[in-house]
Image (cartoon, rainbow, N blue to C red):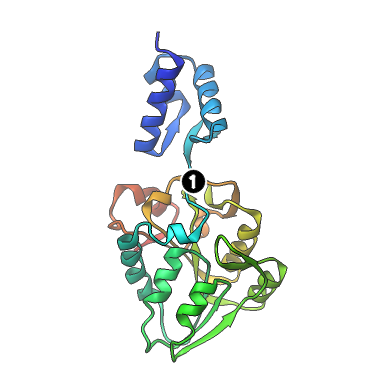
Amino acid sequence: MISKEERHDFILVKIKKERKLVMTELAAELGVSEHTVRRDLKELSDAGLLRAIRGGATLRSNLPFDIYYRNNLDVMEKQAIAEKSITLLKDHQVVFFDGGTTTQAIAGNIPDSLNLTVVTHSLPIANILANLPNISLIFAGGAFCKSSLTMQGQQTISTFEEIYADVSFIGVCSLDPYRGLTARTREETAIKRVLCKNSMNIVAATTSNKLDTLASFLTCRASDISYLITEKDPSDRILQPYVEQGITIL
């Protein structure tokens, strides 16, 4: 009979490949009961190696907190995402920019000629846009978060609550087609929710390694998202479940 250690190894290899596991299928593959698989998934979840969910498991978000470290990750992929994202921008739009290294890449690709009103709580993004001649910049102040270089708290939220945007670029921690857009902390989630609520078009711009992962706090349902932009070709099979949620893929 297969040992617990062998089952755990099998589960961890499989989830890294498939991103999401179904308990009944695992039980059949391993030749054990669903009760045994449920216990295995709980142990692996408690160890922080995956996230147990009803009926199976999904990858846990492995996004590092520190923005200085994240700046050096997936640089080419973020540039490809930024180039696609810019196609959504038109003169005289009001645009929300959430914090994050991918949204920073988008901000860095805005052409000098584009006339926009940009609202952001991200210090790096404000710095990037400060010298663009046709950008009207509104900075949402608040309590400074050192790990993300963004402002947080009620003062920040209040600024966004007073404005309606044409487009909102949301920084993605985790996105799952069935469990939605999630984040790690209540503070950042509170801001993301306002950005989503007050925007005509919600844009999730993210590298594909954050897809089919789950964090603790819900920002919005996947079906609320207007556009999903990754480095992948829009026809890639990993994106099909998001198409089924009514999201336009770029």
Extreme right residue here? 154
Pick the front one: 245 or 167: 167
* Residue marked by disc 1: 61
Instruction: Tell me, yes or no, if residue 59 can be seen here.
Output: yes
**Quadrant location of the C terminus in the rendered image:** bottom left
Choose between 195 and 119: the one closer to the eye: 119
Which residue is at a point 40% across and 12% down the rendered structure image? 2
- Residue 130, horizontal then vertical, whole percent: 49, 84
Instruction: State the image coordinates of residue 165 (x, y, percent, origin top left).
Output: 55, 76
**Residue at image coords 71%, 72%:** 155
Instruction: Name the outermost residue toward the top.
Output: 1
| Label 1 crowd (10 A; few <14 / some 14-19 / many >=20) | many
Residue 19 at x, y percent in the picture: 40, 39
177 vs 82, left or right, is right
Q: Quadrant of the N terminus?
A: top left
Residue at 44% across / 58% down in the picture? 70
* Element under disc 1: loop
Residue 95 in view: no
The amino acid type, in three-letter code, at marker 1 is Ser
Q: Is residue 12 above or below residue 68?
A: above
Q: At 53% from the left edge and 23% from the top edge, which residue is drawn?
A: 38
User: In this orientation, which residue lies closer to the viewer: 171 or 212?
Assistant: 171
The quadrant holding residue 71 is bottom left
Q: Position of residue 85 (x, y in %)?
A: 38, 70
Q: Nearer the viewer, residue 83 or 127?
A: 127
Q: For the image shown, how many numbered marks are present on the structure?
A: 1
